[in-house]
Image (cartoon, rainbow, N blue to C red):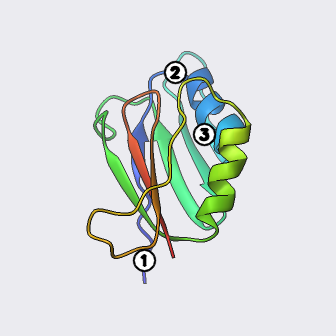
Amino acid sequence: MTKAIPILRIFDYDKAIEFYINWLSFKIDWENKPTNSPIYMQISLGDLVLHLSEHYGDSTPGSGVYIDNFKELKKFHSTIIAKDYKYNRPGLQKPFLKTKPLCMDVIDPFGNRLSFNEV
Protein backbone atom coordinates (compact mmCIF):
# COMPACT_ATOMS: atom_id res chain seq x y z
CA MET A 1 0.00 0.00 0.00
CA THR A 2 1.15 3.52 -0.71
CA LYS A 3 1.96 5.72 2.30
CA ALA A 4 0.38 9.17 2.67
CA ILE A 5 2.59 11.88 4.18
CA PRO A 6 0.90 15.07 5.43
CA ILE A 7 2.40 18.40 4.35
CA LEU A 8 2.13 21.15 6.99
CA ARG A 9 2.68 24.81 6.16
CA ILE A 10 5.28 26.62 8.25
CA PHE A 11 6.48 30.23 8.17
CA ASP A 12 9.62 30.23 10.31
CA TYR A 13 12.34 27.58 10.21
CA ASP A 14 13.67 28.32 13.71
CA LYS A 15 10.19 28.12 15.27
CA ALA A 16 9.56 24.83 13.46
CA ILE A 17 12.83 23.39 14.79
CA GLU A 18 12.05 24.60 18.33
CA PHE A 19 8.60 22.97 18.23
CA TYR A 20 9.06 19.76 16.23
CA ILE A 21 12.69 18.85 16.89
CA ASN A 22 13.56 20.33 20.29
CA TRP A 23 10.18 19.87 22.00
CA LEU A 24 8.39 16.95 20.32
CA SER A 25 11.66 15.08 19.56
CA PHE A 26 11.11 14.53 15.84
CA LYS A 27 14.29 14.10 13.83
CA ILE A 28 15.17 15.77 10.56
CA ASP A 29 15.35 13.17 7.78
CA TRP A 30 16.27 15.65 5.07
CA GLU A 31 15.99 19.33 4.18
CA ASN A 32 15.81 21.28 0.95
CA LYS A 33 17.09 24.74 1.92
CA PRO A 34 18.21 26.62 -1.18
CA THR A 35 19.66 30.07 -0.52
CA ASN A 36 16.98 32.77 -0.36
CA SER A 37 14.18 30.27 -1.08
CA PRO A 38 11.43 28.60 0.97
CA ILE A 39 12.36 25.52 2.98
CA TYR A 40 10.91 22.05 2.45
CA MET A 41 11.84 19.26 4.84
CA GLN A 42 10.91 15.81 6.08
CA ILE A 43 10.80 15.01 9.79
CA SER A 44 9.91 11.80 11.59
CA LEU A 45 9.11 10.39 15.00
CA GLY A 46 9.31 6.62 14.78
CA ASP A 47 7.03 5.63 11.90
CA LEU A 48 5.29 9.03 11.87
CA VAL A 49 6.51 11.09 8.91
CA LEU A 50 5.60 14.73 8.19
CA HIS A 51 6.68 17.20 5.53
CA LEU A 52 7.06 20.84 6.57
CA SER A 53 6.97 23.50 3.88
CA GLU A 54 7.38 27.27 3.62
CA HIS A 55 6.24 27.14 -0.02
CA TYR A 56 3.12 29.10 -0.89
CA GLY A 57 0.34 26.70 -1.84
CA ASP A 58 1.74 23.72 0.06
CA SER A 59 -1.12 23.02 2.46
CA THR A 60 -3.16 25.51 4.43
CA PRO A 61 -2.15 27.00 7.78
CA GLY A 62 -4.37 25.48 10.45
CA SER A 63 -4.41 21.97 9.00
CA GLY A 64 -4.89 18.94 11.21
CA VAL A 65 -3.19 15.55 11.38
CA TYR A 66 -4.87 12.62 13.15
CA ILE A 67 -2.15 10.30 14.46
CA ASP A 68 -3.61 6.87 15.16
CA ASN A 69 -2.28 4.05 17.34
CA PHE A 70 0.41 6.13 19.06
CA LYS A 71 2.17 3.84 21.56
CA GLU A 72 2.99 4.95 25.11
CA LEU A 73 1.19 8.29 24.90
CA LYS A 74 1.40 8.85 28.68
CA LYS A 75 5.18 8.44 28.56
CA PHE A 76 5.48 10.75 25.53
CA HIS A 77 3.27 13.31 27.29
CA SER A 78 5.44 13.19 30.44
CA THR A 79 8.59 13.65 28.34
CA ILE A 80 7.37 16.74 26.51
CA ILE A 81 5.82 18.32 29.63
CA ALA A 82 9.16 17.90 31.46
CA LYS A 83 10.82 20.01 28.75
CA ASP A 84 8.74 23.00 29.96
CA TYR A 85 8.04 24.42 26.49
CA LYS A 86 6.50 27.80 27.32
CA TYR A 87 4.15 27.97 24.33
CA ASN A 88 2.28 24.68 24.75
CA ARG A 89 1.34 22.46 27.71
CA PRO A 90 -1.12 19.89 26.38
CA GLY A 91 -3.15 17.63 28.60
CA LEU A 92 -4.17 14.03 28.15
CA GLN A 93 -7.87 13.50 27.67
CA LYS A 94 -10.45 10.89 26.84
CA PRO A 95 -11.48 11.18 23.18
CA PHE A 96 -14.94 12.58 22.49
CA LEU A 97 -16.08 9.45 20.67
CA LYS A 98 -14.25 7.16 23.14
CA THR A 99 -12.85 4.95 20.39
CA LYS A 100 -9.36 5.23 21.90
CA PRO A 101 -8.25 5.26 25.55
CA LEU A 102 -6.41 8.61 25.50
CA CYS A 103 -5.61 11.46 23.16
CA MET A 104 -3.49 14.62 23.19
CA ASP A 105 -3.75 17.60 20.85
CA VAL A 106 -0.90 20.02 20.25
CA ILE A 107 -1.01 23.14 18.09
CA ASP A 108 2.20 24.15 16.33
CA PRO A 109 3.31 27.80 16.03
CA PHE A 110 1.62 27.98 12.61
CA GLY A 111 -1.83 26.86 13.75
CA ASN A 112 -1.54 23.22 12.62
CA ARG A 113 -3.05 20.65 15.00
CA LEU A 114 -1.48 17.26 15.72
CA SER A 115 -3.91 14.88 17.42
CA PHE A 116 -2.05 11.97 19.04
CA ASN A 117 -4.35 9.01 19.75
CA GLU A 118 -3.25 6.06 21.87
CA VAL A 119 -3.42 2.45 20.74
Earlier-in-chain disc, 2 versus 1 = 1
Q: Mark 1 and mark 3: span between their CA atoms?
A: 25 Å
Disc 3 packing (10 Å; few <14; some 14–19; many ≥20): some
Image side of residue 49 versus residue 76, left or right? left
Residue 27 seen: no
Residue 3: x and y, percent?
45, 72
Would residue 68 be seen by someone viewing this image from the given angle? yes
| Residue 82 image point, x, y percent | 73, 39
Vertical comparison of 69 with 9: above or below: below
Which disc, if any, is residue 51?
none
Residue labelled with disc 1: 2
Q: Nearer the viewer, mark 3 or mark 2?
A: 3
The residue shown at (58%, 48%) is 42
Q: Residue at label 3?
A: 20
Check disc 3 and give the amino acid type.
Tyr
Quadrant including the N terminus: bottom left
What residue is pinned by disc 2?
Answer: 12
Mark closest to the chain's N terminus, 1 or 3:
1
Type of amino acid at the residue the image marks with label 1: Thr
At numbered mark 1, what does the secondary structure look like: helix, strand or loop?
A: loop
Q: Earlier in the sequence, mark 3 or mark 2?
A: 2
Label 1 packing within 10 angstroms: few (<14), some (14-19), many (20+): few
Circle 2 sits in a helix, a strand or a loop, which is it? loop
Per the model, the C-alpha gap separating discs 2 and 1 is 30 Å
Residue 90 point in image, percent of width and height: 51, 42
**As shown in the figure, which amino acid type bears the numbered disc 2?**
Asp
Q: Residue at x 62, y 22 (%)?
A: 14
